[in-house]
Amino acid sequence: MKTNNSIDAVTQHLRALAGAEAPGARLPSVRDLMRDLHVSPVTVQAALERLSSEGVVEARPGQGTFARGPAKVPPPADLGWQSVALGAGRVVTDGLSSLLVMPRPGTRPLNLGYLPEELQATALLSIAAGRALRRPGVWGRMPIEGLEALRAWFAAASGFSAHEVTICPGTQAANAAAFRALAGSGDALLIESPTYSGAIVGARAAGLRLVPVPTDEDGVRPDLLEDAFRRSGARLFYCQPTYANPTGAVLSRTRRAEVLAVVRRAGAFLIEDDWARDFGLDGDPPPPLAPAENDGHVVYVRSLTKCAAPGLRIGAICARGAALERLRATRLVEDFSVPGIMQETALHLVTSPSWERHLRVLRAELRRRRDRLAAAVLRHPGLGTVNEPPGGLHLWLRLPPGVSDAAVAAEAARRNVLVSAGQHWFPAEASDPYLRLSFAASQPDWIEEAAATLAAIVAEEVARVG
Ligand SMILES: Cc1ncc(COP(=O)(O)O)c(C=O)c1O
């Protein structure tokens, strides 16, 4: 089987062999490696490609693979001048970059924001990518707004028409484009608190002034939203109405209408980030806000990275009127367009007769994983209180008062349990200490032990803070 773990192991083995040999020495053949290490030719090939790109080995067609000798280490460069040239305006990515770190083998990744490999639509994607490769013109120029048929697919679910859809490389890119296109540097952005850390860092990088609006189990509070619009003069509100990351909250029916009314009265835009539309675990999600609104106040974003695979960086942003023009112009200056091969693959995937089945099977498995993680957490009342999200990928655990979420997350990482500290999910001060626990990658053979590890760390922290 080709997994990243087995490729890593073969790479390590070959690296050691090549390092022990003189430059030019022949290394074992693919066949010998397959036999000795009990791995597939694809795994051996992947390891050889890695080492070849690093210059550790040289593959000579028809002759075999040879050691290249130790790489020449260049003298250390003096990059001090860059600090002077760049000044202090660094892009702060705290919280987001730690989420995207690749987990080390053996760690328990309860911080994953995407599907783990075994739940991704890998087989369907292989078929779709094969078909995409055979499409005439797939390597040609793409329209900036994206493939017509793929736009029509995104439009169908969101109440927009295909000409109002622009294909983007994922929701992060869509949100970032919206922050830049619909507001100017220094403008206020209303943002739920807590909310997705990638939106927080994206908005800050666009120079926006973040104004947090509190949420509860029914989503954002319309009374405080109205107040925030009035005080800040904001014209933009970033919102996750359905299975919000990290709380799992769903904006209630009555609040949906109220929020739209508040946004209309403020003459503002609402960016609806519908990242988890396919992750309704206890029944269907409510429809998006977008179809309930016709006057161009809602800008809708959605992507396939979550429900298919993180490497399928395809999403869409939908808008009307001048907002659509500005978004297209922003996308154009940033990116031109999303590669055709990726768009064609996405189109073949979502129109495949097996796509709905993939989603059904996926939801059933995610439900099992959510329930298992929740049960494991509930066995340790000292951990605090945990929500019961009807969808999404995460549990939101409120730790006992006074405990440092950052200290718990750091100690858990030292003990190989990866979790996300709640403070990264607040645009300002956190209301309480929280951990975000992702159930997507949780496994029955370690979940109890991971929960017990967290409980032990929290108990130590509680004792320490008294
Ligand atoms: C709420 C939310 N929006 C956007 C994103 C970014 O997703 P994508 O991979 O589509 O860029 C994420 C990823 O975690 C998310 O949770």
Image (cartoon, helix red, strand yellow):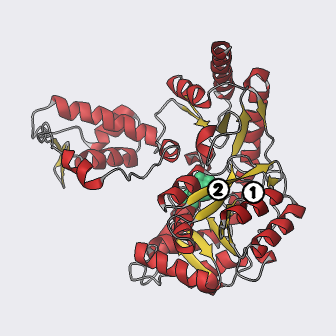
Q: Are the residues tagged 1 and 2 within 8 Å (C-beta)?
A: no
Query: With respect to residue 217, does 315 lie above or below?
Result: below
Q: Amino acid at mark 2?
A: Val
- Asked whether the viewer can see residue 222, the reply is yes
Instruction: Give the total of numbered labels.
Output: 2
Residue 122 can be seen in this image: no
**Circle on res. 292:** none
Which residue is the site of mark 2? 211
Q: Give the residue drawn at x 33%, y 48%.
A: 45
* Residue in the image at 47% along x and 84% along y: 143
Q: Looking at the picture, does residue 465 appear above or below residue 96?
A: above
Quarter of the image for residue 459 reads top right
Q: Quadrant of ligand 1?
A: bottom right
The C terminus lies in which quarter of the figure? top right
Would you say the beta carbon of the disc 1 residue lies within 8 angstroms of ligand 1?
no
- Residue type, numbered disc 1: Arg
Residue at left offset 31%, top offset 52%: 87
Q: Is residue 1 above or below residue 262?
A: above
Q: Read off the residue under disc 1.
A: 360
The residue drawn where x is 78% and y is 78% is 293
Describe the element under mark 2 as helix, strand or loop. Answer: strand
Most distant residue in the front direction: 231
